[in-house]
Image: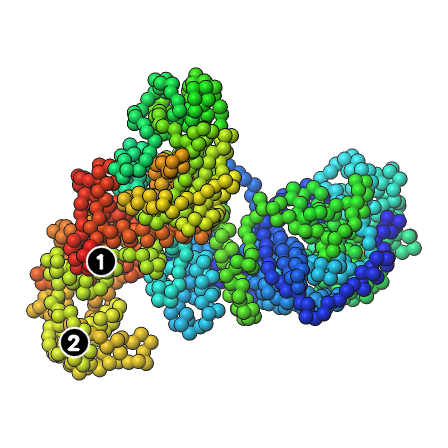
């Protein structure tokens, strides 16, 4: 069992206030010992000391929170005292993390309909999933991170997707054709993604660089592959796809409509488009089609966003209920005649930027989804489409 | 002395008109509808006036108070300046001050200020501040003198003064009674490290200021010399400016006397100007020596037409302090720093006390380090209202990296030290929250603060503050950890990282938690084969499950918490369990029999569980109480069901076969509990109740090792663990339950394991040490993976579905 440091010692170390007893104590005790701030120093000794002091402070604060919780979270006190007391406990719980509470406290919370908000966090879930993958455990969602699986899966479901020969090419071997999209097999943030509107009109999606010939594009791509010219060179593995346009006449590429889905529940939709200069405009919609903000507004506001009609919600909801994972972002393209599948994103970028309300809402939706999946399994569902597309329909050898 | 002309008391013409401003009927109340604040770090600027010395950024809270009177809305601003010991505001990171601020801000929300006229408005503000001062009065911190949280209270008071003044269409200076219109900044201090030549050049460049102010080095000779250099430079420029030296409490006793004598001698020989002001001569705790030193100075100056004054600074924060200081001898100059004395009104009163105490006390108005435009505007308003003002040391923060108001506080022109006139009512400017935003540490807004309904009970304030300060401390630690990770855990750094660097990262990760991580950091961990230990925690999973249940999300494991379901399930699997009719009885309905177990339907920790080995041998398992007859047991059970008890048992009981490990010796079965993660046994807990009711425990791993899981229990001497066959069998049972974790509690009977119960959430889970907390969590996620794999391969959990009524047909 962890031994708690003396409460008053901790309080005074942290400069926290206290009642009359503390007041007397402090009057007796010594003077303050302010530490002067250190300039940033790269030396490891310094870093060690910093980490050490950070650890000490963290442990003190953690111990203090546990200490306060054990003082406040008591069944009898919660029963006998009024709303004011409950309000205090709620305020304290706002500052608490799962690691601060004990089993009896959990029971006390459950019986008093109190919630530990930090107990459900999408951010924490994403980090846990990352650790889970590192440990080599099976995560169904990540199978769809692979384009071949993803396309096989949506083909099974009959969802429209960009046409492609599914072959991997060297860039030099590509035939000059248009209109197509050329993409590296592995890349992030549309680096190396070229929109070939015509052979004399090619755009690098990431930053809006325009090329007036196939040759210029090839040179640009070679630069992205050159270890000498870039920190993070691309490999010479490319794919070609049909270009989805929102307006063929105006050669306007499709905008992105990304659905944050939790096994049949769409919680959030982001509608975005890349401007010709490579910048992005984004707008978020909630499940009722109302515009919303998530706290992660890093991009320009997409004033011209249209939202998503209900029947399209239905389509995406159906896709998500075929995936045996609590969360999947389903990225669609708004084509001229409806939504076209883009890709699956099991872990959305910048998940930490969701504000606390959305972080919690995502966490809640995650556990609901877990429950619904297992309820469906018990009801006889076996995710045949998913299993077939991902080749998981046979038992794997026991490890 | 001509330089000080503009600071002299002078009735302002406009003033009388302003003082006859309109009044409001008492029904037109001024209601505070919102209080907002940003805690920000005011970045240090070049040394210049009151904006601060070089170095550390200062913690300030930019306060906005919104008030409504009828149709009209007014926004008042102020700036809290918590400066630890200087202002009595708690810790360095301003955590306590922030907690105090929030608590007081909640008390301001929805408050009505009876500000119907000038006097009433002042009274209303004064009353609020008195109340707040009393609320926080019991706080103290080591090394802090005087009333606490003066720096925090100062900012709140300024915001209130601003809002009431605006509502009356007055400037704050008018509200305070106004004394002068024109203000002139006396001096800008010159740094101590300047060489003589450079010092002379700088002095000569200070055309705009009427006074030459120097910061002292602390060495007698050097400081005398610096005064001489400055005086000579002034003389060369054709100016007769007073000299002002800031000594920073460097001298006391003999040295102080010698220094003052040295200055006086040099004044007499015309090496210095005829007016000299010495600030900070004595350290705060030696201020009682001031009278002596001043008398010395007075003696030296008498009849020589010289004016040498020792400033009383810092030590006097209340009129009482001041009267005391004056009573001891001669107080000839008083420095007032409103954040230090606890507010604008307190400063104003102090100045009045100084005038009353002695007709010839010079008044200096100064700010504390790290004053942004907001405070400068406030102090200039005060400066216009002080009954006397000889030196104004509060300069517009022209060199500050952040300007916090619109309009900014400025001089009237490039070449003048006059302050630009104030055009607007109230403080004279609005705040610029956006300018501050890049430096913001945290925010408060009473409009979406769930606790603003606080009753304001005085007794609750400390609990309020405790919790707020605690939360603030946690946020501050969290931010530091996040920042440390951000500074170190990124692609470029990791690419060049050597072993030592990676070791440091691991150290940092050891104290980090998921909430400190970002997407990019998670990627770096994955790419560098690093792990966030706390990222997988059984404790966190247990809380997640608890919250999930609270939301009503389906958790199949809990279906087995019900005995009927549990027995139906193990019956499906053909697992032996104690014979039972599964009926519920009142205690009086129970038929006498043995060997049996009598248990309450709902109960924890075997309270009310009776092992009836023979009619005259009954044991209450909870505490080992031996009962020698059925009647004794009835009495015992009645006692447990007594309504007087706080945790009384309901009169609902069941009867079961008693499982014995050795029927000849009438030895009860040993508990063997398997912590199972869907086909994988992570830990085994073997336990028996000793005769005194105490539990003796031994833990085993699946490999038969005895691990330290962090839970201290009485050791169990004769433990046997589980056989490989038993392990495989329990693992197989667990693989029929579609959940990542279940504790399967078995009884070791005479001829093998007998089922006891399922426990979806084991008690004391939080006591597992961090290694085992992680091991359990890893078991959990592996199990999650296997469940989905099995589902995809066609598994349907029919036994579970059937026993729990969750299969398709049961809807």
In the image, residue A215 sits, relative to residue B176, either above or below, namely above
Subunit of label 1: B
Residue B809 in view (yes/no): yes
- Chain of the residue under label 2: B
Residue B441 vs residue A117, the one in the foreground: A117
Q: Which residue is mark 1?
A: B811
Quadrant for the C terminus of chain B in the image: bottom left
Give how far across and how far down residue A357 sits, in percent. Answer: 45, 53
Query: Residue at the location (12% across, 56% down)?
Result: B573
Mark 1 → mark 2, Cα distance in angstroms: 45 Å
Residue denoted by label 2 = B618
- Labels 1, 2: front one: 1
Residue under the point 57% across and 54% down: B94
From this view, report whether residue A166 is shown above or below residue B228: above
Residue drawn where x is 45% and y is 28% of the image: A249
Q: Is residue A102 above or below residue B516?
A: below
Q: In the image, is B710 to the left or to the right of A257?
A: left
Q: Can residue B536 be seen here?
A: no
Mark 2 surroundings within 10 Å by alpha-carbon count, few (fewer than 14), some (14 through 19), many (20 or more): many
The image position of residue B560, as x and y in percent, is 22, 60
Who comes first in sequence, dot 1 or dot 2? 2
Q: State which quadrant residue B177 falls in.
A: bottom right
Q: Quadrant of residue A394?
A: top left
Secondary structure of the residue carrying tag 1 is loop
Quick check: do tags 1 and 2 share a chain?
A: yes
Specify the label residue B273 is tagged with: none
Task: Tell me residue B461's x, y (percent).
Answer: 55, 66
């Amino acid at each position: 069992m962890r031994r708690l440091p003396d409460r008053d010692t901790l309080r005074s170390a942290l400069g926290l206030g206290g009642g009359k007893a503390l007041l007397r104590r402090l009057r007796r005790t010594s003077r303050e010992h302010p530490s002067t701030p250190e300039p940033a120093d790269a030396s490891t000794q310094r870093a060690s000391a910093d980490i050490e002091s950070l650890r000490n402070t963290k442990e003190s604060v953690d111990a203090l929170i546990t200490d306060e919780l054990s003082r406040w979270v008591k069944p009898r006190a919660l029963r006998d005292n009024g709303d004011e007391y409950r309000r205090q406990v709620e305020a304290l719980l706002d500052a608490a993390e799962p690691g601060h509470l004990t089993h009896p406290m959990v029971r006390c919370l459950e019986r008093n309909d109190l919630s530990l908000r930090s107990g459900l966090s999408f951010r924490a879930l994403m980090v846990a999933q990352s650790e889970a993958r590192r440990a080599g455990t099976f995560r169904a969602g990540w199978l769809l991170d692979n384009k071949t699986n993803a396309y096989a899966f949506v083909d099974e479901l009959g969802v429209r997707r960009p046409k492609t020969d599914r072959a991997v090419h060297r860039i030099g071997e590509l035939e000059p054709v248009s209109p197509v999209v050329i993409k590296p097999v592995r890349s992030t943030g549309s680096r190396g993604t070229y929109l070939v509107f015509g052979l004399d009109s090619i755009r690098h999606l990431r930053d809006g660089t325009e090329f007036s010939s196939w040759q210029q594009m090839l040179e640009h791509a070679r630069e992205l592959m050159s270890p000498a010219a870039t920190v993070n060179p691309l490999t010479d593995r490319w794919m070609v796809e049909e270009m989805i346009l929102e307006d063929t006449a105006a050669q306007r590429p499709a905008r992105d409509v990304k659905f944050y889905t939790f096994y049949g529940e769409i919680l959030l939709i982001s509608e975005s488009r890349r401007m010709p200069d490579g910048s992005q405009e984004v707008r978020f919609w909630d499940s009722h089609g109302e515009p919303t903000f998530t706290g992660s507004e890093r991009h320009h506001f997409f004033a011209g966003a249209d939202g998503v009609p209900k029947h399209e919600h239905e389509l995406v909801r159906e896709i998500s209920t075929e995936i045996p994972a609590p969360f999947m972002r389903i990225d669609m393209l708004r084509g001229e005649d409806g939504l076209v599948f883009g890709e699956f994103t099991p872990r959305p970028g910048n998940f930490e930027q969701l504000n606390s309300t959305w972080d919690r809402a995502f966490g809640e939706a995650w556990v609901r989804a877990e429950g619904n999946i297992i309820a469906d399994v018990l009801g006889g569902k076996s995710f045949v489409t998913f299993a077939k597309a991902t080749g998981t329909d046979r038992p794997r050898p026991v490890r | 002395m001509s330089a000080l002309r503009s600071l002299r008391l002078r009735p302002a013409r406009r003033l009388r008109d302003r003082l006859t401003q309109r009044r409001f009927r008492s029904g037109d109340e001024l209601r505070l509808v919102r209080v907002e604040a940003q805690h920000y770090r005011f970045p240090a600027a070049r040394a210049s006036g009151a904006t601060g010395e070089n170095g550390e950024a200062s913690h300030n809270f930019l306060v906005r108070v919104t008030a409504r009177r009828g149709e009209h809305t007014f926004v008042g601003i102020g700036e809290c300046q918590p400066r630890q010991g200087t202002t009595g505001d708690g810790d360095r990171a301003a955590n306590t001050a922030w907690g105090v601020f929030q608590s007081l801000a909640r008390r301001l929300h929805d408050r009505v200020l009876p500000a119907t006229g000038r006097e009433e408005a002042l009274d209303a503000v004064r009353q609020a501040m008195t109340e707040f001062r009393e609320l926080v009065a019991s706080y103290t911190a080591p090394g802090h003198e005087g009333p606490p949280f003066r720096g925090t209270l100062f900012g709140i008071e300024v915001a209130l003064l601003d809002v009431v003044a605006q509502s009356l269409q007055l400037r704050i200076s008018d509200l305070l009674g106004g004394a002068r219109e024109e203000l002139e900044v006396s001096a800008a201090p010159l740094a101590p490290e300047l060489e003589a030549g450079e010092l002379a050049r700088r002095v000569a460049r200070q055309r705009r200021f009427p006074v030459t102010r120097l910061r002292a080095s602390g060495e007698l000779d050097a400081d005398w010399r610096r005064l001489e250099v400055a005086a000579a430079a002034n003389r060369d420029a054709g100016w007769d400016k007073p000299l002002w030296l800031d000594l920073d409490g460097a001298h006391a006793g003999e040295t102080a006397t010698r220094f003052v004598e040295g200055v006086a001698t040099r004044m007499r020989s015309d090496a210095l100007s005829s007016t000299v002001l010495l600030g900070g001569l004595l350290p705060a705790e030696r201020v009682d020596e001031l009278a002596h030193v001043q008398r010395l100075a007075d003696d030296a100056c008498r009849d020589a037409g010289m004016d040498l004054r020792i400033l009383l600074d810092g030590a006097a924060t209340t009129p009482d302090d001041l009267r005391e200081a004056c009573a001891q001898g001669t107080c000839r100059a008083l420095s007032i720093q409103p954040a230090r004395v606890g507010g604008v009104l307190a400063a104003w009163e102090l100045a009045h006390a100084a005038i009353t105490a002695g007709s010839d006390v010079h008044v200096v108005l100064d700010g504390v380090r790290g004053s942004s435009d907001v405070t400068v505007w406030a102090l200039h308003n005060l400066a216009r209202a002080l009954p006397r003002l000889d030196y104004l040391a509060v300069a517009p923060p022209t060199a500050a990296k952040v300007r916090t108001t619109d309009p900014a506080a400025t001089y009237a022109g490039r070449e003048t030290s006059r302050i630009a006139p104030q055009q607007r009512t109230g403080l004279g400017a609005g705040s610029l929250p956006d300018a501050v935003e890049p430096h913001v540490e945290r925010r408060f807004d009473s409009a979406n603060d769930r606790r603003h309904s606080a009753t304001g009970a005085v007794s609750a304030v400390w609990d309020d503050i405790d919790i707020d300060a605690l939360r603030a401390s946690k946020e501050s630690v969290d931010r530091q950890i996040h920042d440390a990770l951000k500074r170190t855990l990124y692609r470029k750094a990791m690419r060049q990282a050597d072993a030592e660097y990676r070791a440091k990262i691991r150290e940092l990760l050891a104290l980090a938690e998921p909430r400190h991580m970002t997407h990019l950091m998670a990627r770096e961990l994955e790419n560098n084969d690093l792990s966030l230990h706390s990222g997988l925690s059984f404790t966190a999973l247990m809380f997640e499950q608890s919250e999930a249940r609270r939301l009503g999300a389906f958790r199949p494991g809990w279906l087995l918490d019900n005995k009927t379901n549990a027995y139906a399930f193990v019956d499906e699997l053909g697992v032996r369990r104690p014979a039972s009719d599964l009926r519920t009885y009142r205690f009086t309905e129970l038929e006498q029999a043995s060997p049996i177990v009598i248990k309450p339907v709902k109960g924890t920790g075997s309270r009310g569980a009776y092992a009836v080995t023979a009619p005259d041998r009954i044991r209450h398992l909870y505490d080992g109480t031996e009962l020698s007859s059925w009647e004794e047991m009835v009495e015992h059970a009645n006692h447990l069901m007594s309504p007087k008890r706080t945790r009384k048992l309901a009169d609902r009981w069941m009867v079961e076969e008693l499982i014995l490990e050795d029927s000849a010796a009438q030895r009860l079965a040993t508990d063997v509990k398997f912590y199972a993660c869907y086909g994988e046994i992570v830990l085994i807990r073997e336990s028996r109740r000793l005769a005194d009711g105490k539990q003796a425990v031994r833990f085993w791993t699946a490999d038969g090792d005895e691990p330290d899981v962090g839970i201290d229990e009485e050791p169990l001497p004769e433990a046997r663990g589980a056989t490989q066959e038993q392990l495989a069998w329990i693992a197989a049972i667990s693989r029929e339950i579609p959940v990542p974790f279940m504790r399967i509690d078995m009884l070791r009977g005479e001829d093998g394991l007998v089922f006891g119960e399922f426990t979806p959430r084991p008690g004391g889970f939080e006591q597992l040490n961090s290694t085992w907390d992680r091991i359990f969590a890893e078991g959990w996620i592996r199990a999650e993976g296997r469940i989905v794999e099995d589902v995809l391969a066609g598994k349907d959990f029919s036994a579970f579905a059937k026993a729990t009524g969750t299969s398709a047909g049961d809807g």
